[in-house]
C-alpha cells in the first residue's frame, strides 16, 4: 500500500499545481482519501475520489494512474471499481469515455475475463473506429482464444498501416488455420491457407514448411526439396528446422551425393549454421567413417563447437583401442552441454528445447530460432 500512496502523492502534487484556485479544497479531500488508502479502507477512499472527479473532471488523470498502479500490483478488483465508478457517473464528459472503457478493458484482461474485455474494446471501436489500442487488444484476445478468423479480420484493418509488423502476424494466423486443415485431412484448405500466409509475408518460413511437408507426404520429393531449400532465402537460421526432412527427400530419390554437395555449399555460404555434424553423417554414408573423421578433425579446429567435438569423439571411440579415454571425454562434453538449449527467442531471450512459432514468454510470432552454443575460439 505504501508504494501506491507515494505514487498517488506525486500525482496529487502535479494535480494541485495545475489547479491552484482549487488547491486548498482538493488537497484537503485528496489527503483524506490518501489517509483511507494508507489505512486500507479502499471503499471510503474510492468514494472520495469519485466525488472529487465529478466536481472537477480535470483530475481524472489521477484516477487513471491509481487504477494502473492497482493493475500493476495485480489488484484487479480495485482497479475495476475505480473505472466502473467513473463510467457510471451521469456527468461523465464524452471526451473521457473511450479512455475509461479502454482502462476497464485492461482490468478485465488482467483478471482473465476475456468476454467482458472484448465487449468493451468493441464498444470503443464503435465510438472510435481507428482506435489502435482497441484493435490490438481484440487481436490479443482472439489470439488467446485461438479464434483465428476474428484475429485475421481485425488485423487486416491494421495491415495497410504497418505491413512489416502486421503481415507476419496475419501469416501465422493463416498457418494456424492450415494446421487445423492438415489435422482434418482437408488438403485443399491447407494449401489455400498456407499460400494466403505467403501473400501477407513472403518470408513466412512456417507456410513454406507446411507446403513442403505436404509435397513430401505425397511422394513429390523433388518439389519438396525445392521448397525446403527456399527457406534459406526466407530466413537462413530456420534451415536447421528443415534439414532432416530435406535429407529424407534426397534419400528417397537416391540422391545422397547431391544432398552432400548441397550441404557443403550451404555451410560455405553460412558458416554460423554449424552443419558439420550433418555433413559428417552424409560423408560417412558416401565415403566411410575415415572420411567423416578427417572432415570433422579439420572442421572443429577452424570452427569449434561442442556438438562437433562430441561427434568426432564418438567416431574416435569406435576407431581406437583406447576407447575408455574417449568415453571419459564424451562424458565431460555431455556435462558441458547439459545447460545448452536448442531454441531461443530473439525478442525476449526465452529459451527452450522445444520449438514454438509463438513465443510463450513475449508472445511474438516467429522469433524463437535455433540456438547454437560455440566453443571459445
Image (tube, helix red, strand yellow):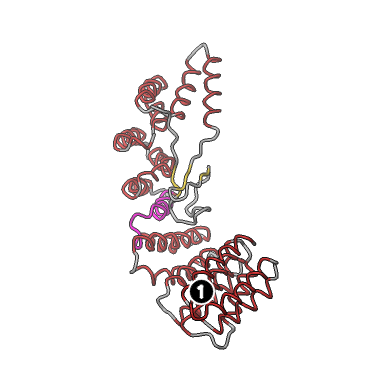
Picture coordinates of residue 60 (x, y %)? 52, 76
Picture coordinates of residue 316 (x, y %)? 47, 18
Q: Is residue 97 visible?
A: no
Q: How many tags in the picture? A: 1
- The residue positioned 45% from the left and 23% from the top of the image is 312
| 364 is within the stretch colored magenta | no
- The residue where tag 1 is placed is 16
Q: Secondary structure at mark 1?
A: helix
Picture coordinates of residue 341 (x, y %)? 51, 39
Q: Is residue 366 visible?
A: yes
Magenta segment: 199-216
The correct choice, above or below, for 254 with respect to 125 in the image is above
The answer to whether 368 appears left or right of 294 in the picture is: right
- The residue positioned 29% from the left and 37% from the top of the image is 269
Picture coordinates of residue 45 (x, y %)? 65, 74
The correct choice, above or below, for 139 with respect to 267 in the image is below
- The residue positioned 52% from the left and 31% from the top of the image is 337
Of residues 375 and 240, the one nearer the viewer is 375
Question: Image quadrant for the C terminus?
Answer: top left
Of residues 349 and 254, the one nearer the viewer is 349
- Mark 1, Cα crowd under 10 Å, few <14 / some 14-19 / many 20+, is some
**As drawn, which residue projects farthest toward the top?**
321
The correct choice, above or below, for 160 with respect to 238 in the image is below
Decide whether the magenta segment is chiefly helix, strand or loop: helix
| 206 is within the stretch colored magenta | yes
Question: Image quadrant for the N terminus?
Answer: bottom right
Amino acid at each position: 500500500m505504501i508504494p501506491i500512496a507515494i505514487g498517488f502523492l506525486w500525482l496529487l502534487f502535479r494535480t494541485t499545481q495545475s489547479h491552484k484556485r482549487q488547491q486548498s479544497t482538493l488537497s484537503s479531500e485528496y489527503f483524506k482519501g490518501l489517509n483511507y488508502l494508507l489505512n486500507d479502507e479502499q471503499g471510503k477512499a474510492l468514494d472520495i475520489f469519485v466525488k472529487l472527479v465529478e466536481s472537477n473532471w480535470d483530475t481524472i488523470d489521477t484516477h487513471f494512474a491509481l487504477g494502473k498502479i492497482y493493475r500493476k500490483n495485480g489488484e484487479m478488483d480495485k482497479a475495476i471499481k475505480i473505472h466502473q465508478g467513473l463510467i457510471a457517473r451521469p456527468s461523465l464528459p464524452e471526451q473521457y469515455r473511450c479512455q475509461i472503457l479502454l482502462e476497464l478493458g485492461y482490468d478485465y484482461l488482467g483478471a482473465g475475463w476475456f468476454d467482458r474485455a472484448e465487449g468493451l474494446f468493441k464498444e470503443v471501436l464503435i465510438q472510435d473506429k481507428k482506435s489502435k489500442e482497441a484493435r490490438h487488444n481484440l487481436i490479443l484476445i482472439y489470439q488467446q482464444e485461438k479464434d483465428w478468423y476474428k484475429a485475421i479480420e481485425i488485423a487486416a484493418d491494421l495491415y495497410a498501416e504497418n505491413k512489416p509488423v502486421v503481415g507476419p502476424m496475419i501469416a501465422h494466423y493463416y498457418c494456424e488455420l492450415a494446421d487445423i486443415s492438415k489435422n482434418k485431412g482437408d488438403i485443399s484448405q491447407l494449401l489455400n491457407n498456407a499460400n494466403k500466409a505467403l501473400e501477407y509475408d513472403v518470408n513466412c518460413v512456417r507456410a513454406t514448411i507446411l507446403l513442403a511437408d505436404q509435397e513430401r507426404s505425397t511422394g513429390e520429393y523433388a518439389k519438396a526439396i525445392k521448397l525446403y531449400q527456399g527457406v534459406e532465402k526466407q530466413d537462413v537460421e530456420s534451415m536447421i528446422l528443415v534439414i532432416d526432412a530435406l535429407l529424407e527427400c534426397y534419400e528417397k530419390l537416391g540422391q545422397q551425393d547431391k544432398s552432400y554437395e548441397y550441404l557443403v555449399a550451404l555451410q560455405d555460404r553460412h558458416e554460423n549454421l554449424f552443419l558439420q555434424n550433418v555433413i559428417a553423417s552424409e560423408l560417412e554414408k558416401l565415403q566411410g567413417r575415415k572420411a567423416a573423421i578427417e572432415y570433422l578433425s579439420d572442421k572443429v579446429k577452424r570452427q569449434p563447437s561442442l556438438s562437433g567435438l562430441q561427434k568426432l569423439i564418438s567416431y574416435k571411440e569406435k576407431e581406437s583401442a583406447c576407447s575408455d579415454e574417449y568415453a571419459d571425454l564424451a562424458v565431460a562434453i555431455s556435462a558441458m552441454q547439459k545447460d545448452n538449449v536448442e531454441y531461443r527467442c530473439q525478442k525476449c531471450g526465452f529459451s527452450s528445447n522445444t520449438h514454438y512459432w509463438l513465443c510463450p514468454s513475449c508472445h511474438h510470432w516467429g522469433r524463437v530460432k535455433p540456438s547454437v552454443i560455440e566453443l571459445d575460439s
